[in-house]
Image (cartoon, rainbow, N blue to C red):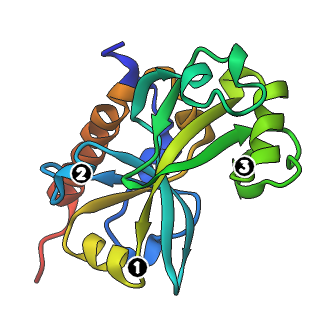
Amino acid sequence: MRYLFFLLPAALLLAQSKNPGDLAPGKFLITTSPAPDPIFAESVILLIRYGADGAFGLMINRPSGIPIARALHELRGAGGHNEPVFFGGPVQLDAVFALSRAPAKPEGATEVFGRLYLLAAKPALEKSLAHARSSDVRMYLGYCGWSPHQLENEVTRGGWYILTGDEALVFDGDPETLWRRLIRKAESQLARARITAPAAR
């Protein structure tokens, strides 16, 4: 699995940024190394909502090791899912969310980008568990949230890389190594940009 970083899409890597102006729904936030806040160390966050009232996202690389069937047993349809529930972030850990990949917008879902949708209402979560393939749905407990201007300030201080969202990485088969693969590429690209940048006159 250590060789998977060679397979990251070139378009994603070319979109690497540290400019707060590039923040938008559907972008990935990658903590820089070392992380300014240990809670977010080595995290990859999908930014789902972003605007004047703040930002909301889900960590996509923190599987809990607890099967969905056990962690979310109160939801209909959860019993057949042995894949782990993910730690979505430090805020409101009793809140349940799902990211679902579907050819059409599921009822009660919010579009993130492309074929990727956020589910939060109980009926939508249960329907997704009952009908979606395990490879097309991931469940999360908690979320990441920022008050107005907080995220922009963190990016300005160098706390995050911003990458264009990629549906395949949300459902990556080795999420625990995802940060290491992305940060290696982001920092390598940044170093190359510094080397090739024309000298100031």
Q: Residue at x 52, y 84 (%)?
A: 53
For label 2, the residue is 39
Quadrant of the image for the C terminus? bottom left
Residue 189 position within the rendered picture, expressed as x and y whole percent measured from the top left: 28, 48
Q: CA distance from mark 2 to mark 1?
A: 17 Å
Residue 21 position within the rendered picture, expressed as x and y whole percent measured from the top left: 43, 78
Q: Nearer the viewer, residue 109 or 18?
A: 109
Q: Nearer the viewer, residue 193 or 75?
A: 75
Left or right: residue 149 versus residue 95 is left
Label 2 residue SS: helix
For label 1, the residue is 147
Q: CA distance from mark 3 to mark 2?
A: 26 Å
Amino acid of disc 2: Ile
Residue 181 versus residue 198 in the image, above or below: above
Label 3 residue SS: strand
| Residue furthest to the front | 74
For label 3, the residue is 117
Q: Residue at x 88, y 45 (%)?
A: 104
Label 1 residue SS: loop
Q: Nearer the viewer, residue 63 or 4?
A: 63
